[in-house]
Image (cartoon, rainbow, N blue to C red):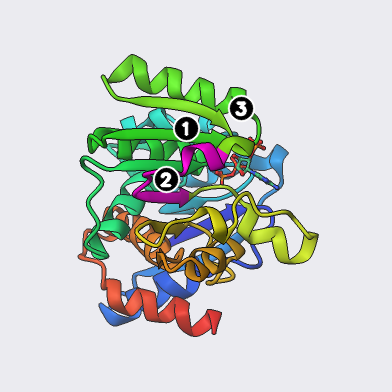
Amino acid sequence: MKKIVLIGDPIDHSLSPDMHNAAFKELNIDNEFQYSKLYVKADELDIFVKRIRSKEFFGANVTTPYKSKVIRFLDELTTDAENAGAVNTIFIKNEKIVGHSTDGLGCINALKENNIEVHGKKILILGAGGAARAISYKIAFENPKELIILNRTKWKAEELVKTIIEKMKINIKAEGISNINDELKYTDILINCTSVGMREVNENIKLPLSSENLDSQMIVMDIVYNPLKTGILKEAEKAGCKTINGLSMLVHQGAIGFKLWTGEIPPLKLMKEAVRRELE
Ligand code: ATR
């Protein structure tokens, strides 16, 4: 059996096993592949990678808080992982343990699935963590008219902008998230890559934006998928914007890993339904 595991802390809430195991079953490869969660402590990351090396595990997904911490134990990084400074997918290639980041392409593919082009548009990205970095790079490569990265901790957005400018010529700037209202004008697409949506319900977190400052022409995407309708998406709906929840991106970023591990074309629709069933 080829075992794929998800590591992180916490991982209880993750729906990746439902998504991948449903897909293995659909393609009749569930006797060959199995996906499960594995609780790993921060000081056990090196042991975990050794377990991949010894072929106990065939591949892995990595989630918070290990996306950056795991890097030093891997043999190689893909360019996407290097740019993101984060790894969410691990696979073996030529006996090497390779770290990859599928968040950026997953986000672009989720936009494409919704017939949304980034080229020539004004894009606002909220956040400057691992997911935001991966997504910002991929968006930048699509040649938008303007890219603005806003983060609560402004210097992290500035650092990200600096590394992107070093690699390509693009109209880009960093801002503190409190300046969002000044930047929203003429925005075509806003993507929330902060973890605000995940926690606002439990922790009374203040949303970074409100419906009054949104325009109905805008497209608002949240990469948080649980809950499906985050506070930010509720505000966007109130303003009449087109909204995209985190489900599409979850499936598309997972599908890239699925293809790397199995070599099979991922059954996207079925994977989405498997997650939706669990969420509803
Ligand atoms: P991930 O790997 O999922 O991107 P992360 O690297 O921990 O997670 O990044 C979390 C992002 O959410 C960061 O941009 C963080 O902002 P800071 O850099 O200022 O910490 C952002 N974030 C988390 N809680 C937030 C809040 N209450 N308001 C605004 N931004 C928040």
Q: Residues in magenta?
A: 180-191
- Alpha-carbon neighbours of circle 2 within 10 Å: few (<14), some, or many (≥20)? many
Whichever of callouts 2 and 1 sits on the residue coming sooner in the sequence is 1
- Tell me, for residue 24, which label it has, or none: none
Residue 37, visible in the rendered structure: yes
Q: CA distance from mark 3 to mark 1?
A: 30 Å
Q: For the residue labelled by badge 2, is the local secondary structure a helix, a strand or a loop?
A: strand
Q: Give the amino acid at mark 1.
A: Leu
The residue that disc 2 covers is 90
Q: Nearer the viewer, residue 226 or 119?
A: 119
Q: For the residue labelled by badge 1, is the local secondary structure a helix, a strand or a loop?
A: loop
Whichever of callouts 3 and 2 sits on the residue coming sooner in the sequence is 2
For the point 59% across and 35% down, the residue is 179
Do the residues under discs 3 and 2 have CB atoms within 8 angstroms? no
Q: Considering only vertical position in the picture, is 41 above or below 129?
A: below
Q: Residue furthest top?
A: 166
Q: Is residue 140 left or right of residue 209?
A: left
Q: CA distance from mark 3 to mark 2?
A: 30 Å
The residue that disc 1 covers is 74
The quadrant in which the C terminus is found is: bottom right
Residue 128, visible in the rendered structure: no
Q: Residue 234 appears at what percent x and percent y? A: 55, 69
Residue 271: name its quadrant. bottom left
The residue that disc 3 covers is 154
Q: Give the amino acid at mark 3.
A: Lys
